[in-house]
Amino acid sequence: MKKPFWTDAVVYQIYPRSFCDSNGDGIGDIPGIISKLDYLKDLGVDILWLSPIYESPQFDIGYDISDYYKINPEYGTMEDFDRLLEEAKKRGIRIVMDLVANHTSDQHPWFKASKDKNSPYHDYYVWMDGKDGGKRPPNNWTSNFTGPAWTYVPEVGQWYLHIFSAEQPDLNWKNPKVLEEVENIIRFYLDKGVYGFRCDVINQIWKDSYEDSKRITPMARGNEFYLMKEGNHRMLRKIYDDVLSHYDDFVMIGETYNVDLENGKRFQENKELTMFFQFELANVRAFALPVFERPFSAKRFKEVAFKWQKAIEWPTNYLENHDQRRSINKFGDPKRYWKESGKALALFNLTLRGTPFVYQGEEIGMLDLPPRDPATSMDCSARMTNQLMTKMGFVKGLRKKMINLFDRDHARSPMQWNDGISAGFSSNENTWICANPNKNCINVALEEKDPDSILSFYRTLLAYRRKSPALQEGSFLEIETKGDLIAYRRKLGDEEILILLNLTKKKLRLPPFLRSIEGKLALSTREPGDDPTVLLPYEGRLIELA
Ligand code: NOJ
Ligand code: CA
């Protein structure tokens, strides 16, 4: 059997609103993406995942869809999209769409029609009577974006469920019509030549029951009734049987919030999903609430990453996306060791077993925005949390500090192409979200000129990976080390690669058994020091073993 395309592929995530603006309206668009395909080809990526580009009121920047069959006019037309598919194909690049199927926009015609209790669309969503004669929500669940997970609509006399904002009503997957609609959307795009989907919060589509939650978690209370239920597995398998199994090669990449090993394995082994994102590594610094974080520990980082590497047959690796802060800010050192830590994180992400994902700007070491007033954030969840904290009496300084830890604007600022107006993202200086003021020091044009840059390192490493079956498909072999040192091997047939990595600001001495290993240093994140038995801060080595 032919190997599926995704096995050796590297995925690059594009956040279309912030990638490249072709017509100067301050908003990224599809022609902008097309104009950068050669850059992406040179970088060495194979699949582009586009965050949602469908028609949408953009309350949650496209994760609130009002028409699955239309392109958001700000981004272009269906003809533009077809041209993107064609131009990408010419370069051997495939396109993955974002499938948001847990909810729609409240502006979707289905939702508007659902307000009529006699309409067949009423049952497309979760409408329920409230408690206490209808005055209180049907249960005590809270939304992921703060506040109750229910909104009352007087004209209907009922409440509707929304696990995210009120602008994102949840679909009712117990209605077979909903499954049918989603299957039609999938078919439509696969038939157009799309390679597959990244499936938004796909492990919470099935709600088992609508009881009160007994848990005291302040956010997402109620998710014991809708996270990874049997019905969820059943729906995904049905989509495979009904639709996907009729296609030759495709990907279904699950965004599986707080997935555990058991469910993750099941999603994959039962063909419910091709790959899935785990959240444990991205959240390795989180406390119970996202507004707190603990210091970075390379040891903990290693333990979590290795746990998934060892347990999952084909892992999905990422350090950044549009919901996370920039990885150098979270796991590296944005000041003293910006370049070294950017390369060290790349070495890690791109040499683990599985499919690696690179988020736009990660390849040039883009950083978080400077701390800002959450009231002016473009991120609806940051704004909503700010409103809640204001109500609760938090002073502004504290709100700013805490929300800054998860404000999703950080990773959504315009891609920094050069040091010109709006970082070369747009000819307009009023962009939908401001460019990072560090654009003069961090941008593609500068990185391209410098053979020692983070971008050059990505290009070299991705080219290396392409020629290395051990990195692409080899086994992952942990090397047990105490403390912060990260060490592992990748092996396939005769080819064996050793990775040694220091993700700390201090020097790390190699243990005796690693000092005597013979091999050829093929790539490194920085010039080694005089003593080869010591890894300098953020030094990473890729060694070909004899
Ligand atoms: C996960 C997406 O990545 C995020 O951006 C969005 O806000 C939620 N799902 C809701 O769709
Ligand atoms: Ca534009």
Image: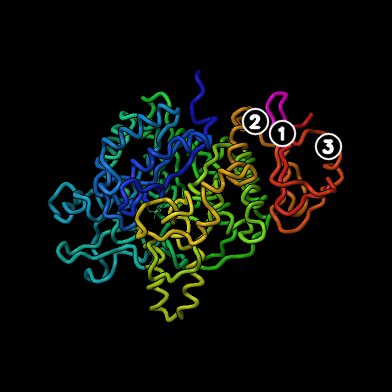
> Quarter of the image holding residue 384?
bottom left
Residue designated by label 1: 497
- Horizontal side of 507 relative to 82 (left or right) equals right
- Horizontal side of 316 relative to 272 (left or right) equals right
Residue positioned 59% across, 60% down in the render:
285
- Mark 2–mark 1 distance (CA, rounded to whole Å): 9 Å
Name the kind of residue labelled 2 in the image. Answer: Gly
Name the kind of residue labelled 1 in the image. Answer: Ile
Residue 167 x %, y %:
28, 59
- Mark 1–mark 3 distance (CA, rounded to whole Å): 12 Å
Select label 2 or label 1 by which is in front. Answer: 1
Disc on the earlier residue, 2 or 1:
2
86 in the magenta segment: no
Residue positioned 25% across, 52% down in the render:
125
Report the magenta residues as a range: 486-497
Disc on the earlier residue, 3 or 2:
2
Asked whether residue 181 appears in the rendered view, the answer is: yes
> Could you tell me if the residues under marks 2 and 1 are in contact, i.e. CB atoms within 8 Å?
yes
* Mark 3 burial class by Cα count in 10 Å: few <14, some 14-19, many 20+: few
Does the residue tagged 1 have its C-beta within 8 Å of any atom of ligand 1? no
Residue 85 x %, y %:
35, 32
- Horizontal side of 208 relative to 177 (left or right) equals right
Residue 62 x %, y %:
33, 51
Residue designated by label 2: 474
Under tag 1, what secondary structure?
strand
